[in-house]
Amino acid sequence: MSNTDHPAHKVCWSCKGPVDASALFCDTCNAIQAPGQLDHFKRFGLTPSFVLDIDAIEATYLKQQQLLHPDRFASKSGREQALSSQQAASLNEAFETLKNPVSRAHYMLRLAGIEPEGGEGHTVNDPELLMEAMEMREALHDAADKGTIDAMIKDTRKQARACEADLGDALASNAFDTAKKLTTRLRYLMKMTEEARAKKSRLAAA
Amino acid sequence: MALLKIHEPGETPLPHEDERQIAVGIDLGTTNSVVAISREEKPEVLRDKSGGNAIVPSVVYYGEDTPIVGEAARDHINTDASRVVSSVKRLMGRGLEDVKLVAGTLPYDVEIPEKSETDNGEPMMVRLNVGNRVLTPVEVSADILRALRARAEESLDQPVEKAVITVPAYFDDGARTATKDAAKLAGIEVLRLVNEPTAAALAYGLDNGVEGLYAVYDLGGGTFDISLLKMQKGVFQVKATGGDAALGGDDFDHTIAEYLLAERKEGGASDALDASDAKRLLKTARKVKEGLTDQDAVEVAVALNGVETTHTVTRDVFEAMIAKLVTRTATITEQVLDDADVLPEDVKGVVLVGGSTRVPAVRKAVADLFEQEPLSDIDPDEVVALGAALQAEALTGGSDNLLLDVTPLSLGLETMGGIVEKVIDRNTPIPVSKAQEFTTYQDGQSAMMIHVVQGEREMVDQCRSLARFALTGIPSMAAGAARIRVQFNVDADGLLTVSAREETTGVEQEVAVKPTYGINEIDMANMLRESMIHAREDMEMRLLTEARVEARRNILAVRAAMDADRALLTPEDDQNIADAIAKLETAMAGDDRDVVNEAAEALENASRPFAESRMDSRIRQALAGQNVDEVN
């Protein structure tokens, strides 16, 4: 019988015995395993959800990096070093994706088989949002002092927080069309905050 | 039966005697270098024979004999300046184009090659004319590293072949590769390239057991780095980093030198300088700068072209001269704080690194910026090497601490119109692996040029070009139909590898490039041949060690499996495996790599039937479990 019939476990490359498909280490010989195709939530032992306790995820992330990072394998064989590098890279990707609300929403949409807007070759088709973005940009352009920009940042952040809450509801109820629109809006709001901050430091430097 | 040591998953068992070599930490600086060792998490710098200075000036004198490194080389500036090379770190991984920008600020002749790229389109590395030799910066750095290695071997009284070497966080891929190449030439195996500010934080963190957000302000001889680190439960997480690879104390020296020259000119003396005069003047300027750390004014005599003049430089004047440079570090720092979304008051402590942080105006600027007095209880010249030594110990002997670093600069590809498409953003944690898909823009297009760049700007010509390669053999398709997947991998040293492949047809077309800024494999091989170290033997030794490590892992794995599933082991297999292990152990005691590998393969064959019955047994169990579930 070939072991590929059974995805629950695979062959450990080191002791050639059976090992759980999602195990980080072989429970028989302790050898580090390849990262496999886990989704980013599963990597942290979670089921997909937009509302997350990022601090708890970070704690898991750091605990796993303590075990998997290439620095832990510097005196091991080349193969173990390569696997550790792959594991650490997968873990970094998972954490970076989930940490940021926009990339987290994009990822959840893709898991649901929906391509988010604004990516490669996807234009945003929401006149209301485009108008709003244009107004924000103009307001930022006209803002000439730190106080005005600070107020704008505060306001944009507040809107972003509200948008995140709505997005969480939409994704939880599989309302993907709404979620897609809200994700685009959140992306714009984050970008505006970033641009406002950049303008603020330009003003301060001048 | 042999006793088995049980390890926690991921715990590194201590290596066996024959592999447990000592590993040092090296701070390969622009102006000064330091080597240190750590034992039981107590790092110390290695001093010269007389127990004196820990600092080795990064200066090499190329006389008729073996190159001389350090203080002794610096002494030759007065007598034979044209053969003295200093601040070579500023040229590491630099192409000709970069050097044109800094030309005139370098105290030696740079050879201008006829073309600026090799036949493969790789940028050519700068070469220096020193005396009657032509040297690359990599070779000069290798000479400095050899001297540091010699100091370590003498001080520790044993061979030293492994090291952690620090680089500025802001070093790009070319400069990192060049540093690793230099170590290779010097016969040093680089366990890890660690960013200087991260190493400094490690030195502070272990001593003080700190938690929270810290900033490391590192102003060295030629580079400026600012990093923000979050320290928690033994993990040092770099949040953001920034800097300028061409800003440092050397620039302070130049400013003073120009000031002295201008004063001489006002007094009627000529301001014409040859390379030797320039080096002597810079040496004087450095003395003035150092004097102004404790004094309000320094008086100095300058003798050039047979005319001696005396000058007084006050601290006020000096501070006005360098104000622009100091402000530039402040601006970069603010940018990094913004990147990390951090306010100065969130920062619990600021660590000062690099000799240039002794300048009072720099200290004051840092204190103003962060609204607190910076920490400087570890010597700013030694702190990086101490951290590197701690990391070297952690990598060879295990540690509870972990460094999580980031990419300092964004990495991307050239797309239509010379626009950069970013694949990996700056401040992304490493190691990282990311892919991007591209497509063809012409019907029947059979090849695609892949141009890898590093930097933050939007246009290709404003970023640093790392590598160019062509993906060929794309099957004939309509424009836009091909799916070309370009994969970027950055390893824990911050080094990039890029590969590309056409995916729609399933045809494997893969090209891997390692950006080698200017030093190609052939040059490297030639240099290794010419160099004094026995590269071939070193390489053989390394391969043998690797074979032994692999063989030992193999034996441990088989024994662990036998312990776990002894019931599945037939007496015949048991005997075969025991024989194969015995043979492998004999082979490992010898020093023929091929014999070790053959014996390892024999063990694998001997244990195969046992491994197969373990797999079968597990699958049967799983199926049985499923049946039970179905019944329920």
Image (spheres, coloured by chain):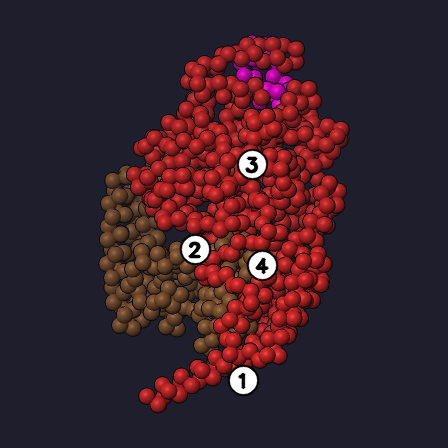
Chain colours: A brown, B red
Residue, disc 1: A1
Q: Which quarter of the figure has residue B592?
A: bottom right
Q: Are marks 3 and 1 in contact (CB under 8 Å)?
A: no
Residue, disc 2: A66
Q: Is residue B276 left or right of residue B197?
A: right
Classify mark 3: residues with Cα within 10 Å, few (<14), some (14-19) or many (20+): many
Q: Residue at x 26, y 72 (%)?
A: A173
Quadrant for the C terminus of chain B in the image: bottom left
The disc label shown at residue A77, or none: 4
**What segment is highlighted magenta in the picture?**
B259-282
Picture layout, residue B265 above or below residue A188? above
Measure the C-alpha gap from mark 2 to mark 4.
18 Å
- Which secondary structure lies at badge 1? loop
Residue, disc 3: B35
Amino acid identity at mark 4: Ser
Q: Is residue B593 left or right of residue A148?
A: right
Measure the C-alpha gap from mark 3 to mark 4.
27 Å
